[in-house]
Amino acid sequence: EPGPLRVALAPAVPLHVRVSGVDGRPIAGALVLAQGDEGVPQAALSSPLGEVSFAGIGERVEGVRVSAPGYAPSSVEPSSRDLTVQLSSPASLLVSVVAAVEATAPAGTVKQPAAGARVWLSGLDVWPPRESSAGRDGDVVWEGLSRGTYDVRAELGGAVAVASLTLERSEHRSLVLELVPGRTIEVLVNDSAPGNAPIAGADVVLVEDGLGPFPLHGSTDAAGRVVLGPLPRGSVTVNARAEGFMPESAVPVSSDALRVQLSLTRGGRVRGRVVDPSGAPIAGASLEVLGSDLRGQPIARRAWLDPLAGAAPSLAAPPPLIPLGELGVLPGPLPVPGGALGSASKSPWVSDASGNFLLQDVPPGRIRVLARHPDFVEATSAEQELAPAAEIALTLQLARGATLSGHVMEPGGRPVARARLEAQGRHSLQQYSALTRDDGSFEFRSVPTELDLFVSRPSDRQRFVLRQSLQLRSGESRQLELRLPPERAALEVSVHGDDQRALDGALVSVFSLDPAEPLRRTLTTDATGKVRIADAAGLPLGLRVQAAGFGNFETQLGAAPARMEVSLQPAVRIVGRVTQVRGRQGLSGALIVWMQGGERRTTRSDVSGEFQLGEASAGSARLRVSHPGFATHFAELTVPAMGRADRAFELSPINLVEAGSVAGVVLDEEGEPVRGARVGLGLVPAFLPAGAEPFGLAQSDARGQFRLDEVPAGRVTISAYAAASGRGSVEDVQVRAGESSGPVEIVLHAGNTDPGPDALASVAITLGERPGSAGVEVVIVNVAAGSEAERADLREGDVLRAVDGWDVHGMAEARRYLGGSEGSDVIVELERDGEWLSLDVRREAVRR
C-alpha cells in the first residue's frame, strides 16, 4: 500500500584528489571516478592544477580510477581523504612475426617477415582481444598499453605462434614471434541417445591450456563435424553445446590427437504452475533449477533474459559460480571472446498471468525447482528425477510468510541507529538485509517461518555479534526487542617459536562456540608476534594458530582470556617411499594425501618412489596412497615431536599391490536399472559437496552398469547408493589382481537411508543410528573428502550430541538442524573417544 517514505542521509566526508605525472606536474582534464557506497561512481575532470574535489561522497570509498589521454590509467584504494595519483605514460609493444622458409644452399632455412599475418593481443585491460594484421615487414605495434601481463597470438595459413610477456609502466618492448606448423583437430558431435545421430549446428570451442585467451570457435555441419585450428602443440580442451542438449565442457584432448568425439545429452522440460495458499495463480514468479546432473555435477540454472528478445544482456543475472576443486567455474562452455557468458534460455523462466511456466533445456538428473516472488516466501519442490528428453509437471505453492519488526537496543536500553540486520531462511536461499532507523527500529516483510537473524554493530557492519533463531507462523506479525551484548574486551594473542622468538605473519583464527554470539576471524600477527581480536574476550572460542615452519596449534577455550601466549613447535618433515612388487621397486607418480587437523596436503612420489611432506604437526594424522592399477593404502598414525626442524619423521615403506576391478549392474526393487548410483567398497556416502569428484567411487550408466577399479585382491563387499532407490550391497565378491570380477548384481532397497535435507545447503556427512545408553545415538559414518566437514575436522565415529544448541535424538532431526543457508556457520557438539568437542562447520551446497 502507498505510504510515507523516509530517507536518512549520512554525513558526507569530502575526498580531494590530485592528479600528476611521474615528473610531479599536474595533469588537467583527467577523468576521476570515485566509487563509494552508491550504485554508480561519482565523476569529475581535474582542474588546470590537476585537482578534483568530491564534496558529497560518503564515509566509505572503495576505489578511485583516474585516466587521461596519453597516459596509462591507474586504480587505487585510498588510504586517506587527501589522495595523490600519479599517471605514467603508456607502454607499447612491437610484435615482429617471422616464418622459417627454405633457401638455396648453403643458407638452408632462413627466417623472413610474415607479411599479412593475423595478430591478436589479450590482457586484463584488453578484452575482448584486439586483432591486427602484420605489415610487409611483419610488424604490428600496439600503443597505449598499461602495466600488466599480455598474451599474443599470430597466425598465417596453417602456422601459429603464441607468447606471454609482462609490461611495466611506460615500458616499450619488442617481441619476435616465430610461426611453426600448427595442428588441426576434427571435432565430431553426436546425440548420446541410441543411434548416436550427428548434431548439426553445434557450437564448438577449442581452448589452449584449458583457460587460454584465444579460443577457436566453429559450428558443426550436417555430419556433426567441424575442423578447428591451427593450434600450437600442448594441452587443449574442447567445449560443445547445441540447442536442446546439455553442454559438454572442458573435455581434455591429448597432445597427439587429431580427432575427438563428444556425445551430448538431450535436456528435459519442466512444466508447472505457481499458486498462493488459496490456489490463485501468481504471475511474475522467477524459476530456478538446482540439483545434480547425471554425472553428479551441480546444476544451477535460473531465469535469464534473452538478448535476442530485446532485453539488454547486461541486465540479466550471470550464472552463479559453482565450486569445482579450487576454482570457481561457470557451468557450460567457456565464452567466445566478445560473446555472452553462459547459455541463455530461449524464453525467460518466469510464470505467466495464469501462474504457468515451461522450463526448457533443463539438465537431466536429480533436480529441485525453486520459485521466487517479492511478495511471497520462496518455495522449493521435492527432489525430482528428470530423464533426458523427458518432461515432468509440478505445482509450487508460495506462502505469504511472516512479518518481523522490532528495535535494536544497546545494553542500557538506548536505540541503536544504522545497525545491520540480516535474516537468513534456514531452509531456503533467501536473505534479507536492513539497517535500523534512527530510533533503532527495523522491519522485514514476507520472511520464511524458520530463520536466523543476525545483528552487527554500526561500527563494523561486516561482523555479526548477535544471532537469534526464530520459529514463526505463516501470516504472523512478531515484534522483537534485540539487545546487543556489551562490547567485550579484545583478545590479545602473542605467538612465538620454541626459541621464544616472536613470529611475524602467523595466522590466528578464532571461531565462537556459542551459536547466539557468532564470531569468525582470521588475522595476522605483527612484527612483535601479537594480534588483537576485538570483542572476543570471555567468549567460548576455538583457537587455531599457523605459521610457516611450525606445526599447528589448536585449542578450545571455555571463556577466552584477555591475553594468551602460544608457543609453536617446529614443523615435522615427513619422508617416505612407495614401492611395488613386494618392495623391490619404487613406484613413481603415486598420489599421497596427508590429512591432519582438518587440513589436506598432497604430493606425488618421484621416479624412485620417494616423497616428502613439509610442515606436518605432531599428533594423529591419516594417510592415503593411491595409484592407477593398484589397491589404495590407508593408514592412521601418530607423528612424534622431532624437536629439531632438520630431523624428519620417516615412514615405513608403503608397498602397493596390484588391484583388480569389479563390473556389474545396479537394479531397483522392481528389477529396473538404476542410473547414477554411486558404487564403492564398503559404505557409500549419501552426501557429497556439490561438484566434488568422489574418490574411489564409480557411477552406474543409463543401463545401470558400472565398473569399479583399484579394488584390492581378496573377498570384498561392494555397495551402491542412489537417493531415490536406497542402498544395496553384495558381500564376499572374489577379486583377483589384474582381473575383472563379475558381473555382480546389486539390488537397492528403500529405507535405512540418511534422510535428505530440507535445506539446499548442509554438512557433507553421512549419518547412522545405533543404540546408546540414553536411547538412539546419531553417529557420523562418512565424511566427504574435500568437504567443509573434513576441513572442520569432523571424523567417522563421532557421535552427534547437539547442533546449534539443539539436542539430537535421531537422524532426521540432526539432518534438519544441519541444514541452512550456504556459507552460514553451524556449531556441532559431538563426543569423540569420551571427549566432548564443539566444532564450527561452514555449510555448503551438497548433493545426494
Image (spheres, rainbow, N blue to C red):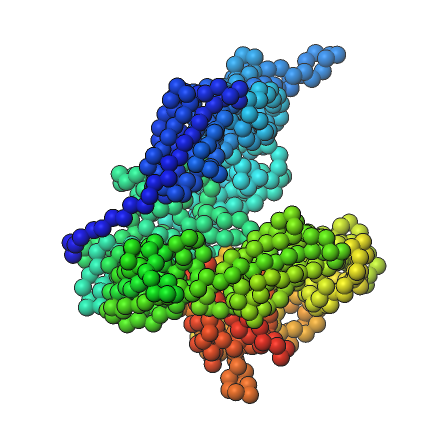
Q: Position of residue 652 (x, y in %)?
A: 80, 63
The residue at the far left in this view is 2
State the residue at coordinates (28%, 64%). 405
The residue at the far right in this view is 584
State the residue at coordinates (35%, 46%). 317
In the rendered view, would you say 607 is above or below 21? below
Q: Position of residue 668 (x, y in %)?
A: 47, 72
Nearest the viewer among 376 and 754 is: 376
Q: Relative to residue 610, is residue 90 drawn left or right? A: left
Q: Position of residue 101 (x, y in %)?
A: 64, 17
State the residue at coordinates (62%, 49%). 526
Nearest the viewer among 14 and 669 is: 14
Nearest the viewer among 847 and 510 is: 510
State the residue at coordinates (65%, 16%). 111
Q: Position of residue 656 (x, y in %)?
A: 74, 62
Query: Residue 688: in sight, yes or no?
Result: no
The residue at the far front in this view is 412
